[in-house]
Amino acid sequence: MKFLFEYHNIVNKKLKKTAYSRKEHDKLYCRSKLSNILRKWNNVMKMESHNQHDMMMSVSKNNMRKKVLEFFYANKKGFNF
C-alpha cells in the first residue's frame, strides 16, 4: 500500500534509518492486519509532545489523524482488516 510505504520511509528518514524498498515493505506489511497497524499508528500520533512547534500543530495533527482513520474505516472492505 503506497500510503504506508511512503509514510514508513518518511519516518525512517527522520529517525536516520534505512529506507525500505517497495518489495521489502510489501513483504513486511502483507502479513499484517491493517487494523493493528492503524491502532499502533493512532496511539503514536495521539502522544503528547512538549515541543513548542508540535503543540501549536496539535490541532492540525489531530484533524489529520481523524481523517486518515475515517478514510480507512469507511473503505475497510478494500483493505486487510
Image (tube, rainbow, N blue to C red):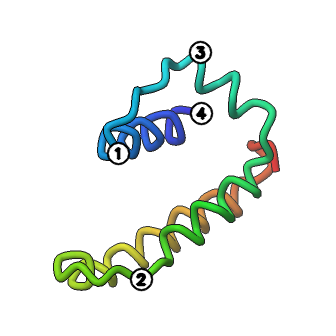
Question: How far apart in space, not on screen, are marks 2 and 3 (Cα)?
Answer: 33 Å
Question: How far apart in space, not on screen, are marks 3 and 4 (Cα)?
Answer: 11 Å
**Relative horizontal placement of residue 30, taking residue 5 as reference (left or right):** right
Q: Residue at x 68, y 65 (%)?
A: 39
In this view, the mark in front (2 or 3): 2
In this view, the mark in front (3 or 4): 3
**Relative horizontal placement of residue 17, taking residue 5 as reference (left or right):** left
Instruction: Indicate which disc, 2 or 4, sits on the residue closer to the N terminus.
Output: 4
- Give percent across and percent down for residue 14: 30, 45
Residue ID for mark 1: 15
Question: How far apart in space, not on screen, are marks 2 and 1 (Cα)?
Answer: 18 Å
How many numbered marks does the figure carry?
4
Instruction: Indicate which disc, 2 or 3, sits on the residue closer to the N terminus.
Output: 3
Instruction: Indicate which disc, 3 or 4, sits on the residue closer to the N terminus.
Output: 4
Depth order, front residue of 42/65: 42
Residue ID for mark 4: 1
Mark 3: which secondary structure? helix
Mark 4: which secondary structure? loop
